Image: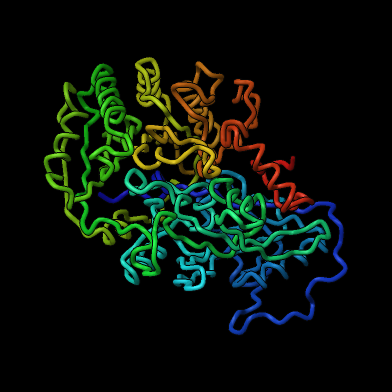
Amino acid sequence: MPISRRRFLGSAAASGAGATLIGVPSPAAAHVGDALPAGHPDAIVGRGDPRYSFLVNRGFNNRYVGSPDTIRLVYSAKQVERALDEAVRQQLPFTVRAGGHCLDALVDDPRFRLLLDVSEMKDVTFDTKMNAFAVEPGLTLGEMYRALYLGWGVTVPAGICPDVGVGGHILGGGYGALSRRFGLSVDYLHAVEVVTVGKNGRARTIVATRDAGDPHRDLWWAHTGGGGGNFGIVTKYWFRDPAATGREPSRLLPRPPDRLYFTWATWPWEGMTEADFVRLVSNHGAWHAANSGPDSPYTGLHSALHLNTEKEQAIFLEIRMDATVPDASRMLDDYIAAVGAGVGVQAQVSTSEEPWLDNTLFAYDFPESEYDRGKSKGSHLRRPLNEEQIRGVYRALTDPAYPNWCMVYLAASGGRVNAVAPDATAVPQRDSLFKLWVSGTWAGADQDVVSIDYVRRLYRGIHAATGGMPVPNEAQDGCYINYPDVDTRDPAWNTSGVPWHALYYKNSYRRLQQVKAKYDPLNVFRHALSIEPA
């Protein structure tokens, strides 16, 4: 079943990394005489360059199109140092981009005059000195999966959209189809190479590891979910399972399943009553509440319920199931039957058995589409939606006055994600059942006002009891920074009285501020949702 790129991002949504420079000290020198590493071009692209249009139009959401004066394609940490030194000296507002999938105005903001693009940094190697896999930030998730799997038979659990960039995705935590079994991407992050800017306005490259004795361990920790564009520019990640022993590469990261059952269960809107809708969503929530523990036999199953607007004609349950698990076919059938039990319309079920890599790289057909403008908002849910919330979603999705498409997406979490302590990484949400994502897409700027308002009101209705936002409590647990939403800073839409940073980072925020003050003392890396110095 092909899914339009502009209508689906799901588990793979990746945060961009923006930054700006205003009024910082000028350094005495800027590495003017330093040679670039052999083989690395010094690619500086201005407005008159024929490459400019291709590079500047790589954003996912065409509501935001940047217009930098200059784009610098960087290929190494040394080049990033040079570019940052020049930006500081010239006091240029700048932003950083890897994959280009930022959902809100953190990267493609016209106020940025310089774009530092790391998308051509694409090496994947095994670093024998670090005893870990070195992954550069310009890779897409699909490129990383292919290289790790074909080279060593291993993977990093991350998002399901293969053309999302590694760079921003990892910094937000990294979640996807294997997370219930293996956890988040950052649970395997052993080290990070990051270019920072010190008090003197000079850039320097730091390698920070999770080793207890590393003086930069706090910088490593901040990159395990602290979001993009906050502390510096990442030029390399190293991944290794913290529980792994020995030096054999194929034993140092998880091995994905050999084969998957890839299933779409489809319930048509035609004939579905409000009671049917409530039953379907309630069944789905109840099943996950009972089957999402770290040791559940269903950690090999990942699913996402696509609650589409009625004009989309159907509701989809998208499922990936490890086909090598004993009795996997029966377990899959039982799951679909439990979700559809008592619903007055019958599901149509389509299942294929596919090699893991084939599914991971080719599960979606992503053609360009006129549906290239969007608004998204996300939440962590500790409990399933209650009946009042579900009825509110039903009324919104069946509203005949709304002309465009929208989806409430419930992606399964739990499993091994919830086996990690909330302070072990910078991702504090470690007991959720679902990631909820509300996303609308449409064609044309003339639809912006009505569509943005619709998405905002739908989301506010879900969280009406807590001021329109998922304020952490027994039922919900804040927001996911890889679904960035600047409305969390807007008192018109966040009436909860809880600041934006408590929604994303909870009690981790104070520690992130301290890291920010230490490694970005001039606050040169900042954007609409950036961490503020202590």
Q: Is residue 90 above or below residue 448?
A: below
Residue drawn where x is 48% and y is 30% of the image:
455
Looking at the image, is 164 positioned above or below residue 332? below
Check the picture and name the quadrant holding the C terminus: top right
The front one of 56 and 43 is 43
Q: Going by the image, does 401 lie left or right of 512?
A: left
**On the rendered structure, is 209 left or right of 431?**
right
Residue 394: % across, % down: 35, 22
Left or right of 400 in this view: 134: right
Q: Nearer the viewer, residue 488 or 190?
A: 190
**As drawn, 459 above or below 169:** above
Look at 50% across and 44% down and name the residue there: 373
Closer-to-camera residue (239/307): 239
Q: State the residue at coordinates (66%, 43%).
A: 530
Residue 399 showing in the rendered view: no
Quarter occupied by residue 119: bottom right
Whole-percent x and y of residue 273?
A: 24, 19
Q: Give the color scheme: rainbow, by chain, secondary structure or one colour.
A: rainbow
Q: Is residue 398 visible?
A: yes
Dividing the picture into quarters, in which one does residue 82 lie? bottom right
Determine the residue located farthest toward the bottom in the rendered image. 38
Q: Is residue 135 left or right of residue 361?
A: right
Q: Quadrant of residue 77?
A: bottom right
